[in-house]
Amino acid sequence: MSGERRIRILYALGAAAMAAFCLLPVAYMLLVAASSRPDVLSARVEVRLTAAHFLAVLETGSLHFPEYVVNSIAVSGLSAVLAVALAAPAAYALTRLELPGRMPILFLVLSVSMFPPVSLVSYLFRMMSALRWINTYAALVLPYTAWVLPLSLWILVGYFSRIPRDLDRAALLDGCGRFAALWKVMVPVAAPGIFSTAILAFIFAFNEFLFALLLTTNQNARTIPVGIALFEGLHGEIPWGMIMAAATLAVVPVVLLALAFQRRIVAGLTEGAVRE
């Protein structure tokens, strides 16, 4: 056996081990969600597959799960759109304008995301309470946008820097202003990177727990992670079957989004539309 083939086999084994490590928890989640008992791995228990947990999650009005799904999609979508809308002009300015201290500015913005979220919850709650925004979409969209904005800016700066300056220079010579050059030239060329950034922002907001727990107290704006954490059984027990069923349903929107736009995400993260 040649050395190159051995290396390929090792790579394949490593990839298989990593895939198993990532997929085993998902498989266990699906098994518990679709079984009649939570202790499905016990050899002494006869397991029967059932859809009862999924039906209970969707049909039990007191759980408000469909409302949580709508809230999560709305909050995540708005946060992603705002983050990209703010990061794109900032990235254009940092890569195209001769601003003094551009890199220190970029590192300063990125350093904001290094603060642990728990250090901000007290001040954030006071501010949202003063604005009377508790249990509203705004109470979640604004913190999510601010938290994901540094990462969005960092990604778009790297992407815009790979686009030839001749494109926007030609637009400026044709009479376009800076904003027109950005929206009519740079944004279409950088569409894969912008789309990838929006997807990452959406996933972050969709999975966020701490801010949603702090700033929502009812189903009006509560998101899926908090809603699942507050599930209770009829007698105060932890309903593992319903929790796993809800978690399975919660994964569906993100998985469908990733599968539907997989090519664009990969193109945005690995390549540019044009390289210098």
Image (cartoon, grey):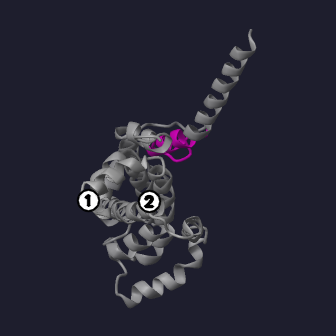
Residue 176's tag is 1
- The residue positioned 51% from the left and 85% from the top of the image is 123
Instruction: Examine the structure image and report whether residue 241 is included in the region drawn in magenta.
Output: no
Name the kind of residue labelled 2 in the image. Arg
Measure the C-alpha gap from mark 2 to mark 1: 15 Å
Which residues are drawn in magenta?
25-43
> Which quadrant of the view contains residue 86?
bottom left
- The residue positioned 44% from the left and 54% from the top of the image is 203
Q: Which of the marked residues, 2 or 1, is nearer the chain's N terminus?
A: 2
Mark 2 neighbour density, 10 Å: few (under 14) some (14–19) many (20 or more): some
Instruction: Examine the structure image and report whether residue 38 is included in the region drawn in magenta.
Output: yes
* Residue 228 placement (x, y as % from top left): 44, 61
Q: Is residue 189 left or right of residue 111?
A: left
- The residue positioned 43% from the left and 58% from the top of the image is 201
- The residue positioned 62% from the left and 30% from the top of the image is 15
Residue 16's tag is none
* Residue 219 placement (x, y as % from top left): 33, 70
Task: Name the secondary structure under disc 2.
Answer: helix
